[in-house]
Image: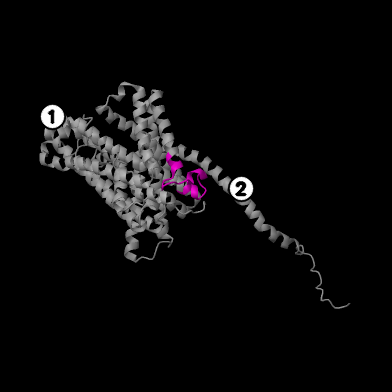
């Protein structure tokens, strides 16, 4: 553990704890990236039964949010799932949570940047040149990273502004679309040939990952004011806000764009805006909204990608360089994350094969669920082992039901990842086992000298004792024989 130092006035000026509004914006901004702009078209082939899947997933996400809130009250430290898993199951489980979450963060940042360039191309023809495309993708990654390096004060400001700029237009489309709603556009309730349960499961597999990010406030609990209270509130409020945007937006698009057109749409929100207000300016408007949305998500995920390694490094489970913190931000973690994401982005554009990148992105959907499973299992462990705070029976039962529901939701996320993602995700986790072995060995070696010096006096005392089975020497009284 590094020794604590008193922050300088310069540090205090740039480092500022998040209040409830910024913490809520962090959760909402990280849950909703750019996927919302394609979701209505993605689930349209299943019919309006996909809204049932939305409802089920929302309940699962809220249960997970409530569990994170309860865990944060008990352990309000930076690291979130890492802290909970390590406290319940030891160093190895904590490392797996930190390792898998870190992989998820930097690979997802690369994916967000690549997707954002696609929307930027609507405004600027960057795709005409590979060099321009790479430069744009790297700029979209490094600008949020620079905001993070400037301090938590600026991270919070960027996140709050991006969230407002993102959700005001989305709400206008979602709410405004209800005034142009035509039930004739909805199409069949169940469009595919599967059973009702099969249709819900199939559409849920697409929607499952729309709620990744509910843990955002818990991961940054150390930077939240009054985390025992505000982390849980921000997590639930942010999840509810994101769910409202998802549901209202999807219903509005379903009701304004004809079903047969929506199934083949590549820009469903643009089509909805064009129907509502006429013209063809919807594509430009949606591109601007998507860029703001993704930059806000990159800003928040960049911070989260550094927080978990920072917490693990303090406990000796990640290299100690990740403990370096300046202006409230783990700067080394931010830099390592953005460099890795940048290298992956460049590889994606120069290798000429999108398949590799798509596989890596799919793997992150599995690695993201590992911390969820460990966190919900930790909550169940705390409740069953009697390590929870003193609560009445009604609350204990309620917390147990929520934890079980959140665990089932997390397992559903794993199942929705697909066999290939689970298989390759496990390989990523096993690669981390080697890193854990290295760090654990270093910890033992570092503790060995102190242990040896502490045991030396005891060994000297043991040498003065008679050997086992030998007769004790007569006690000398000092009297003459």
Which of 124 and 245 lies nearest the eye of the viewer?
124
Q: Secondary structure at mark 2?
A: helix
Is residue 3 something that shows in the picture?
A: yes
> Which residue bears the numbered disc 1?
279
Was residue 330 drawn as part of the magenta stretch in this picture? yes
Q: Picture coordinates of residue 212 (x, y %)? A: 33, 43
**Which residue is drawn at the image coordinates 51% and 53% (left, top)?**
3
> Which residue bears the numbered disc 2?
445
**Which residue is drawn at the image coordinates 34% and 65% (left, top)?**
393
Was residue 10 drawn as part of the magenta stretch in this picture? no
- Work out which quarter of the rendered image holds the C terminus and state it: bottom right
Alpha-carbon distance for marks 1 and 2? 69 Å
Q: Picture coordinates of residue 346 (x, y %)? A: 40, 28
Q: Picture coordinates of residue 165 (x, y %)? A: 24, 41
Is residue 262 something that shows in the picture?
A: no
For residue 256, side relative to residue 154 (left or right): left
| Number of residues whose C-alpha sits closer than 10 Å to that of mark 1, classed few (under 14), some (14–19) or many (20 or more) | few
| Region of the chain picked out in magenta, as a range | 311-334
């Amino acid at each position: 553990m590094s020794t604590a130092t008193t922050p300088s006035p310069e540090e205090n000026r740039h480092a500022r704890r998040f209040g409830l509004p910024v913490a809520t914006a962090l959760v909402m901004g990280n849950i909703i990236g750019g996927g919302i702009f394609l979701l209505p078209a993605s689930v349209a082939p299943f019919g309006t039964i996909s809204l049932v899947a939305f409802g089920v997933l929302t309940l699962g996400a809220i249960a997970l949010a409530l569990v994170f809130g309860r865990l944060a009250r008990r352990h309000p430290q930076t690291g979130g799932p890492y802290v909970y898993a390590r406290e319940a199951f030891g160093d190895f489980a904590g490392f797996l949570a930190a390792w898998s979450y870190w992989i998820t963060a930097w690979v997802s940042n690369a994916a967000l940047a690549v997707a954002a360039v696609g929307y930027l191309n609507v405004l600027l023809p960057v795709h005409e040149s590979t060099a321009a495309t790479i430069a744009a993708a790297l700029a979209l990654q490094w600008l949020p990273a620079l905001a993070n390096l400037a301090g938590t004060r600026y991270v919070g400001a960027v996140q709050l502004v991006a969230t407002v700029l993102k959700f005001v237009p989305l709400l206008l489309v979602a709410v405004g679309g209800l005034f142009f709603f035509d039930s004739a556009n909805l199409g069949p309730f169940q469009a595919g040939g599967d059973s009702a349960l099969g249709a819900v499961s199939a559409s849920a597999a697409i929607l499952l990952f729309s709620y990744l990010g509910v843990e955002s406030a818990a991961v940054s609990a150390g930077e939240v004011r009054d985390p025992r209270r505000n982390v849980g509130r921000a997590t639930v409020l942010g999840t509810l806000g994101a769910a409202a945007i998802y549901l209202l937006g999807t219903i509005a698009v379903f009701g304004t764009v004809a079903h047969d057109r929506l199934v083949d749409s590549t820009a469903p929100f643009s089509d909805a805006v064009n129907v509502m207000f006429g013209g063809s300016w919807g594509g430009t408007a949606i591109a601007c909204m998507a860029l703001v949305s993704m930059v806000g998500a990159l800003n928040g995920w960049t911070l989260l990608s550094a927080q978990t390694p920072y917490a693990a490094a303090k406990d000796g489970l990640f290299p100690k360089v990740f403990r370096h913190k300046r202006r409230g931000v783990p700067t080394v973690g931010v830099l390592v994350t953005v460099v890795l994401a940048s290298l992956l982005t460049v590889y994606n554009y120069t290798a000429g094969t999108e398949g590799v990148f798509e596989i890596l992105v799919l793997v992150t959907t599995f690695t993201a669920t590992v911390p969820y499973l460990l966190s919900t299992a930790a909550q169940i462990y705390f409740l069953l082992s009697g390590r929870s705070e003193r609560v009445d029976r009604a609350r204990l039962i309620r917390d147990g039901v929520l934890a079980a529901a959140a665990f089932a939701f997390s397992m559903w996320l794993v199942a929705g990842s697909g066999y290939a993602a689970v298989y390759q995700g496990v390989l990523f986790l096993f690669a981390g086992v080697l890193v854990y072995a290295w760090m654990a060995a270093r910890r033992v070696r570092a503790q060995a000298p102190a242990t040896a010096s502490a045991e030396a006096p005891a060994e000297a005392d043991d040498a003065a004792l008679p050997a086992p089975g030998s007769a004790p020497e007569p006690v000398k009284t000092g009297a003459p024989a």
